[in-house]
Amino acid sequence: INFRCPNCSCNDRERHLFMFFDKLGFWKEFSNATILHFAPENKLSEKIDSLKPLKYIKADFKPKNNSIEKIDATQIPYPNNFFDVIICNHVLEHIPNYTNAIKEIFRVLKPSGNAILQTPYSKTLLNNFEDAGINNDELRLFFYGERDHYRLFSENHLFEDLKKNGFILKIDKHSDLFDYKSAFYYGVNSKEDLIHVVKPLY
């Protein structure tokens, strides 16, 4: 609640994407593009719709309305090399077998296509922290910080998994794009960089 805009109800994670996309000129990637957007945020969806994409698929494992397709990120029901852009903003931490999701995102993304794969991670851990014994809401809350998270990601481990599965990393650092006041003013996490990956051309 503390990070939700009182005017538009946009939360901090959604607001941060607007900041990155504005600064990087990334909005141009959506025009006349085929887009897959997991757990679509309201204001971000409105903005993408306004850019006239060729096809815009809003997806969720538990859709809230009929405009959102029921899609499991580990079994995406679309052909190879189908999407120009995929947005998966703070979703991977909710998926038990996230490497299957990474493989599927890579499969359905077009060569030279872009994916935004935000997820909370630790710069301290060398490896992801997860254990099969952490198997209920109370334990997940205690060890991972949220009842529906399945691990604490390590930056090193996550980035290596992305590279192993074929992606080129184009990490855009918050500190390179914004001054120190921006995070405070907009209520975003200055330590969260944009996890931008690209599928290489073959």
Image (cartoon, rainbow, N blue to C red):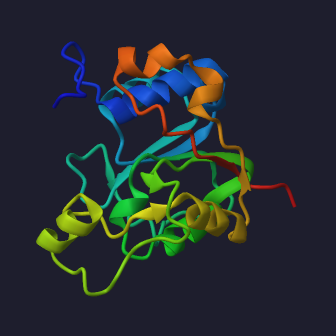
Tell me where residue 180 appears, x and y as whole percent.
51, 18
Tell me where residue 73 appears, x and y as whole percent.
44, 64
| Residue in view at x 30 percent, y 43 percent | 67
Decide if residue 17 is in sight here: yes
Q: In this rendered view, identify the residue nearer to me: 35 or 196.
A: 196
Residue 9 position by quadrant: top left
**Left or right relative to 177: residue 167:** right
| Residue in view at x 46 percent, y 55 percent | 121
* Whether residue 12 is situated above or below residue 154 in the rendered picture: above
| Residue in view at x 87 percent, y 61 percent | 202
Q: In this rendered view, identify the residue nearer to me: 172 or 125.
A: 125
Q: In this rendered view, identify the residue nearer to me: 131 or 24.
A: 131
- Residue farthest toward the bottom in the current orientation of the protein: 133
Residue 193 position by quadrant: top right
Quadrant showing the N terminus: top left
- Residue farthest toward the front in the current orientation of the protein: 124
| Residue in view at x 66 percent, y 66 percent | 160
Decide if residue 48 is in sight here: no
* Whether residue 12 is situated above or below residue 100 in the rendered picture: above
Residue 179 position by quadrant: top right
**Left or right relative to 136: residue 130:** right
Tell me where residue 144 appears, x and y as whole percent.
29, 64
Tell me where residue 191 appears, x and y as whole percent.
49, 38
**Left or right relative to 150: residue 31:** right
